[in-house]
């Protein structure tokens, strides 16, 4: 049986090896490219796209134009993690605001009716590393997870194709299980 192939877009994360290893442990093969090396089209080569976190601010849409175009011209599921979620939200008209720096674990409440959370409890412990926050979901998205510190910890597009996580899912057991839920979108 062929393993699904996932394109991991490296937006400058420090944890690319961990993210790829998690996806591969869950039965996917991965290929990683940076934003400057994106293919213009997926041409059936990939069954999903995962956007890593970023050191570059997600509101720099000129920098992320090719990535936004690629996502808009494909029908595969997309998961944005941390800065990846912020890129998806800003491209849809969302606004980021600075907040307290969070580094380490935090408790997040998720909507367990969502397929993404099929393998976790209603409250999960996830790893955070960021200072920018999405305070509300942009038009066409809804909030599917929240915490005391961030009103938008997870979001999903109305058509279900685009999903975002403020937390770094490549760490901690609950993060792995949420990634397992994402693999159901493309298997």
Image (cartoon, rainbow, N blue to C red):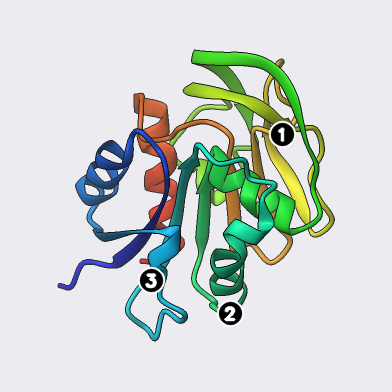
Q: Quick check: 118 left or right of 64?
A: left
Residue positioned 76% across, 48% down in the render: 142
Count the numbered circles shown.
3
- Name the residue that disc number 2 marks: 73
Q: What SS does tag 1 mark?
A: loop
Front position in the image: 56 or 26: 56
Front position in the image: 125 or 169: 169
Q: Is residue 135 above or below residue 24?
A: above
Q: Quick check: 29 left or right of 62?
A: left
Q: Which mark is residue 47?
A: 3
Q: Is residue 37 above or below residue 61?
A: below
| Label 3 environment density (alpha carbons within 10 Å; few <14, some 14–19, many ≥20) | many
Most extreme residue toward the bottom is: 43
- Name the residue that disc number 1 marks: 152
Most extreme residue toward the left is: 1
Whole-percent x and y of residue 43? 39, 86
Residue positioned 45% across, 59% down in the render: 35
- For marks 1 and 2, the one nearer the N-term is 2
Q: Which mark is residue 34?
A: none
Residue positioned 26% across, 59% down in the render: 30
Report whether residue 58 is seen.
yes
- For marks 3 and 1, the one nearer the N-term is 3
From the image, which quarter does the C terminus lie in?
A: bottom left
Whole-percent x and y of residue 2? 18, 73
From the image, which quarter does the N terminus lie in?
A: bottom left
The answer for how far apart the CA atoms under marks 3 and 2 are is 14 Å
Report whether residue 124 is seen.
no
Q: Is residue 69 above or below residue 179?
A: below
The nearer-to-camera label among 3 and 2 is 2
């Amino acid at each position: 049986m062929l393993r699904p192939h996932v394109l991991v877009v490296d937006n400058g994360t420090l944890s690319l090896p961990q993210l790829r290893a998690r996806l591969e442990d869950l039965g996917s093969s991965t290929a990683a490219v940076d934003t400057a090396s994106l293919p213009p089209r997926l041409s059936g080569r990939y069954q999903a796209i995962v956007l890593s976190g970023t050191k570059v601010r997600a509101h720099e849409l000129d920098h992320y134009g090719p990535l936004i175009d690629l996502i808009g011209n494909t029908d595969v599921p997309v998961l944005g993690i941390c800065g990846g979620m912020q890129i998806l939200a800003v491209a849809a008209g969302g606004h980021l605001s600075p907040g307290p720096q969070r580094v380490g674990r935090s408790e997040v409440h998720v909507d367990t009716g969502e397929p993404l959370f099929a393998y976790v409890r209603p409250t999960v412990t996830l790893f955070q590393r960021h200072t920018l926050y999405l305070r509300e979901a942009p038009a066409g998205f809804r909030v599917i997870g929240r915490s005391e510190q961030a009103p938008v910890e997870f979001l999903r597009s109305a058509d279900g194709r685009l999903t975002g996580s403020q937390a770094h899912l490549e760490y901690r057991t609950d993060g792995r299980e949420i990634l397992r839920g994402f693999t159901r979108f493309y298997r």
